[in-house]
Amino acid sequence: MAQYQTMRAQGIGVSAAEIDAGLRAHMNKVYATMSIGMLITFAAAWAISNLAVTALPNEAADALGNGLFLTDLGALLYTTPLSYVIMFAPLIFIFGFSAMMNRMSAATAQVVFYAFAAVMGLSISSIFLVFTGVSIIQTFLVTAIAFAGLSLYGYTTKKDLSGWGTFLIMGVIGLIVASIVNLFIGSGIMTLAISAIGVLIFAGLTAYDTQSIKQEYIDHAQHGDTEWLGKSVIMGALRLYLDFINMFMFLLQFLGNRE
């Protein structure tokens, strides 16, 4: 952040006022793109979950215990080996997206991000079968409030959060490994422990990523690299989107009321 203060004091490349205005516009685009992605995710999840259940059973339908039954599509998505493909599809998608980002235009990257958001919606659609709609909405609102506060802190704090990066990324890797192990163990206590740690890690990442996105813009602002700025909006939106969706999913384990 010291570099930013130096630039503001000396007026390097562009004026401080131009940097401030550009930064605000950049962050607004990041948040707007992230919000659209979030809307796509929850719309896709809701639509798919509605196609997956029916009140009219047939001989092949699986009862959910609440007066609803899985449709043929629901059985395919949630009770066959395809469910594991769907579960890990966002992770595979994210690795491919990151690897190909440099070869994409900003417009293509935006389309791919929205496609990823739809895939994420498919992956988490089962929450509408497991948790009540009211508890999902309540958890979403709690997550949104927490996310806004943490992101605002990351944007406004004078403290350098760059030292958090390595620790938090190691924590994410640990969460992924622990979650895969728990798929086979099926421990309720381990699930709660993973969820609690996950909330803390992605809370920290929200503040860290916000400051990082801000600093990256400042570092490139004087160069006027339009193509980089366009892509950085998508990558910034993706980072914050992942922070939000993961924090939401972990909080749902604590706040969600099961059907």
Image (cartoon, rainbow, N blue to C red):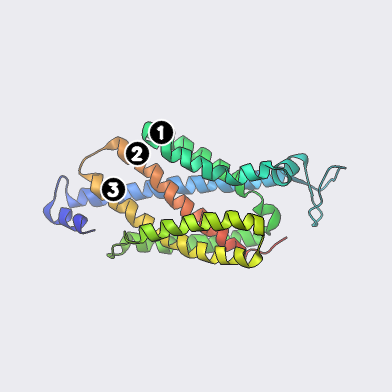
Amino acid type indicated by mark 1: Ala
* Of the pair 63 and 201, the residue shown nearer to us: 201
- Quadrant of the rendering where the N terminus is positioned: bottom left
Q: Secondary structure at mark 3?
A: helix
Give coordinates of residue 130: x percent, y percent. Answer: 69, 56
Amino acid type indicated by mark 3: Tyr
Return the residue at label 3: 217
Return the residue at label 1: 107
Q: Are marks 1 and 2 in contact (CB under 8 Å)?
A: yes
The disc, 1 or 2, on the residue closer to the chain's N-terminal end is: 1
Q: Is residue 151 visible?
A: no
Q: Locate residue 8 relative to residue 257 in the image: left or right.
A: left
- Label 1 Cα crowd, 10 Å radius (few <14 / some 14-19 / many 20+): few
Give coordinates of residue 180: x percent, y percent. Answer: 59, 53
Amino acid type indicated by mark 2: Gly
Give coordinates of residue 134: x percent, y percent. Answer: 65, 61
Q: Locate residue 5 relative to residue 138 in the image: left or right.
A: left
| Distance between mark 2 and mark 3 Cα atoms | 11 Å
Give coordinates of residue 183: x percent, y percent. Answer: 64, 55
Location of residue 210 (image quadrant) = bottom left
Farthest left residue in view: 10
Question: Residue at left 36%, top 64%?
Answer: 153
Q: Is residue 89 visible?
A: yes
Image: 224 above or below 248: above
Return the residue at label 2: 230
Question: Residue at left 39%, top 47%?
Answer: 236
Farthest right residue in view: 59
The disc, 2 or 3, on the residue closer to the chain's N-terminal end is: 3
Specify the label residue 182 is tagged with.
none
